Image (cartoon, coloured by chain):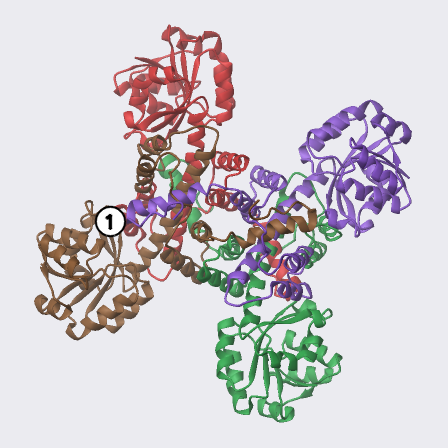
Chain colours: A red, B brown, C purple, D green
Amino acid sequence: MQLGVIGLGRMGQIVVDRVLDAGHDVVAFDLDAAAVATAADAGARPAEDLNDLTDRLGEGKRIWLMVPAGEAVDATLSELEPHLDAEDVVVDGGNSHFESSVRRAESTDAAYLDCGTSGGPAGAELGFSLMIGGPEWAYEAMTPVFDAIATGPAGHDRMGPSGSGHYVKMVHNGVEYALMQTYGEGFELLANGRYDLDLESVARTWNNGAVIRSWLLELCEEAFREEGNDLGDVADHVAGGSTGTWTVQEALEQEIPVPLIYQALAERFGSRADDGRFARRLANRLRYGFGRHEVQRRGE
Amino acid sequence: MQLGVIGLGRMGQIVVDRVLDAGHDVVAFDLDAAAVATAADAGARPAEDLNDLTDRLGEGKRIWLMVPAGEAVDATLSELEPHLDAEDVVVDGGNSHFESSVRRAESTDAAYLDCGTSGGPAGAELGFSLMIGGPEWAYEAMTPVFDAIATGPAGHDRMGPSGSGHYVKMVHNGVEYALMQTYGEGFELLANGRYDLDLESVARTWNNGAVIRSWLLELCEEAFREEGNDLGDVADHVAGGSTGTWTVQEALEQEIPVPLIYQALAERFGSRADDGRFARRLANRLRYGFGRHEVQRRGE
Amino acid sequence: MQLGVIGLGRMGQIVVDRVLDAGHDVVAFDLDAAAVATAADAGARPAEDLNDLTDRLGEGKRIWLMVPAGEAVDATLSELEPHLDAEDVVVDGGNSHFESSVRRAESTDAAYLDCGTSGGPAGAELGFSLMIGGPEWAYEAMTPVFDAIATGPAGHDRMGPSGSGHYVKMVHNGVEYALMQTYGEGFELLANGRYDLDLESVARTWNNGAVIRSWLLELCEEAFREEGNDLGDVADHVAGGSTGTWTVQEALEQEIPVPLIYQALAERFGSRADDGRFARRLANRLRYGFGRHEVQRRGE
Amino acid sequence: MQLGVIGLGRMGQIVVDRVLDAGHDVVAFDLDAAAVATAADAGARPAEDLNDLTDRLGEGKRIWLMVPAGEAVDATLSELEPHLDAEDVVVDGGNSHFESSVRRAESTDAAYLDCGTSGGPAGAELGFSLMIGGPEWAYEAMTPVFDAIATGPAGHDRMGPSGSGHYVKMVHNGVEYALMQTYGEGFELLANGRYDLDLESVARTWNNGAVIRSWLLELCEEAFREEGNDLGDVADHVAGGSTGTWTVQEALEQEIPVPLIYQALAERFGSRADDGRFARRLANRLRYGFGRHEVQRRGE
């Protein structure tokens, strides 16, 4: 089949490659001409603009958006809209908020699928996990493409109606934060504990048969191998956080306790408190207040 | 080579089977004659008692203990001690506290290896992950047995001196608690959230290519398949907790923050507060104290 | 001076009483005629409706809203609006979200003050703590009323521009949740710990000179005195949570970690999970998955 | 009555002063002669050593220990022991672990009272809160002294048998950590939130009538007044932690969840992680592992 791919960043190029490898045709567009050229080298037909892309796709268009979540999605959709009708299918493969996806699904004439995509650039070889929300017929129509982009048929499924794909992906990311922080706590204790341990060996041993084996633990093993046992100059600064924030916000709205996910997110915030945590500075001072304990000052 | 196995419960029988399968000889003993008979059926030579077992092993004994952590280990060791000398190797494959292992290593004439064993009965086919502490020569001497019991050579390693094997296993279990609770939080949000989701499908889709894929997530998938989407009659009651408690105790002593691991342990305690959480009952009453909010009473 | 009070529930009546006691005039209105009658008995002039109330107040109206946060505030304001001009002052003394207060301040012709009110019905005698946001002149103009409703001049202050009063009150409530839960944890440990303790005596002893003495601790003392050492039939069910939720939401937006406040809120949610916590039910089942630990079932 | 006071540090001198002020006699000793001289200036009779102190006290000795928790208590007690008999009363007013107090009570011939003392040097004027464990007759015998040292009769009580005083004090301190951290979170949000606030004014307004008013909040008010709105050069480094650690250890043993108290303690540990939190450094690197997100490096 034929797929239009809009957005040719790192993830978009992987989508192009995997769909081409599966024997499909790809029409590719990005605002960056160099990215379009890369896709063309890989075998995609380059589009000059969105008009050109939709022209080339003809009737029953199948379009995959891989543009940054937020305004770029709306801008692209609004430019596409005049060319879309009820037989077309648009997939948003990015990290959009599920409520945005519901809104977009309602406002386009095309069938709209929200597709949570997990696996990251590291998944280029293996394929991704795709969590998809939207009309059943559109999901069925896109199955050959999903088979190609995912690890295979088991790597994608329709979660439910519009928004459910990005909803499940949002929760996935919340879980991801907490898993990462959990491994971090374990290795922090090992790194500062009673024994001089080879953390790469610990991770490798665990990855072979232990209850806690996982892909993230394989990435821990890789991290110790590449950065060294003490993680070298890797900073205590964890960027990102929007999907984890969404997860906690949704959990607040649903009144579901998610203390581990929350704490993992809070650790990220804490790692970015470049001026020190005010809460702890006040606690420091309060110990003087009642106990006349010496107040440690900056620069001491 | 020849291995004496003491303790033929579920895990001990798996050890016997895997060592026999690898072509080694096993002399097996348990206080329960039926368990000895099972091992004998599998091909092990049965021992009548510990005297008999040590007699059969001759010089350079290699002994694997798979008895419950605690007094049973000390009792077994004290009965073995008269038969042990510096050329013998004793492995404790159970969940002993690392400080007990250090103490035992110091008090026996044999070389003593503390071996954290992860993978559970479910690891019978694949083999286990073995984290081993103790003298290097003893680790080397036992390598054929470790190869057999572990998933293979990559599934075991010497962590360091006495106690380090059980130390790493202790932290492994703390991490395990938090990973389980994290997946639990994610699925709790999905189960009570905005969409009617098929949680087995979610877990399966995640297990195929998602960042959070893991063996525990495969067990989640299995749980939903076997218990149903709402987990049927599975109770909100999480048993166990000793190794997680040790992890937090050690983290307190080392002054390392482990909030996610702590919280996972606290959730277990909370699930066992059969009479309600006193803290929340007091908070309920305090809301009346200042705000005259109605106090919800039991049975209402 | 003269004050119109709209909303004569428990808190509104206290406002009426305190303002009257300070020698001011009050014109009072509520949709419930009985509440108006109560205020009239106390010495207020009853208003038949909002028209009547504004008529009676004349020029330079001073109006205190003590209606439930949310739609009731908007409905009241929209009915008042035709009668308001730039010399009038309207105070919202309820628990409105600060963003609603900013919006309302911008849409009314009157000067609008958002006033966080803490102390609860229990503060009827002592007076309240008032955190006020909005135009300085309006704050000054209302000072006699604030003096009367607050504990005195020290019990109120202008926090800053519109919204800041309710903003500070929101954070106050988040702190309140965590303080309550903290005392709860301490008493839970004492109630279940190694000694048979008289918790009322503990609280009273602490309230006399201990670092942790506070008004909430006085309410703990009262709770043990009135409910008994085991809190009798007080349920493990903590209602409420909107202002605490707002606090956490704002902290997420500001990327400020508030783990204790979050956890206090999560405990409330957990206390209302009448069907058990799904997260822990899954953890229960996972222990069987890898360890073949028995799954505790409901009704066992 | 007559009281021997051993240990004349900041707290010991306050004890001497308050007991003298109440009209009792004090015999005072400290290893530091200057401290003894200070007590003598205040009106106490100086003792040359412990022999001298016990000689001066005669029969039915009443002795207050205010020495640092730990070995100093045992050393003092072992030197006192030859001079003690069943009619004597020894009070340990320091922060000893309750299990040490139980052990000491069992090993001395005197009646032994463990007395948790809260209020800190700041309580010199007001008096302290005293939580006392041990034999009832000894508690009764010491009542005049407790009345003097505490805020008055309401400021002390017998909690129960040996150890219960220090047990309740231990929990008090765990609660104290969490209250301090909670106020810290609230003020951190206010300090970094949407409005430019005068935090001293916020604290003062809250201390006058708000639900969350407390002595610790008065100390917050003082901190902002003395250090400035941004706490000046107060460092993000919270020292101390032993009694909070004991509280969490005891809660682990009792299987009681104390997530807020734990988190407050973990924040202290985190504030002292001078080399960055390893857990977060690993999370930073893992984001590169799966997502090729740039790894922030130290010094960037």
Q: Residues within 10 Å of mark 1 (few under 14, many from 20)?
A: many
What residue is drawn where x is 9% and y is 69%?
B55
| Quadrant of res C2 | top right
Q: Is residue C126 visible?
A: yes
Q: Quadrant of the N terminus of chain A?
A: top left
Q: How far from the left and from the top, in percent, is residue D244? A: 53, 62
Q: Is residue D81 above or below residue D207?
A: below
Q: How far from the left and from the top, in percent, is residue D1? A: 70, 86
| Quadrant of res B74 | bottom left
Q: How far from the left and from the top, in percent, is residue C237? A: 56, 46
Q: How far from the left and from the top, in percent, is residue D279? A: 42, 49
Toward the viewer: A139 or D141?
Answer: D141
SS label for mark 1: helix
Left/right placement of residue B235 relative to residue C62 reads left
Q: Is residue C137 visible?
A: no
Q: Which residue is mark 1?
A: B121
Left/right placement of residue C112 relative to residue C200 reads right
Q: Quadrant of the C terminus of chain A?
A: bottom right
Q: Is residue B131 above or below residue A163?
A: below
Instruction: Tell me the kind of residue under disc 1.
Output: Pro
Toward the viewer: B292 or C136?
Answer: B292
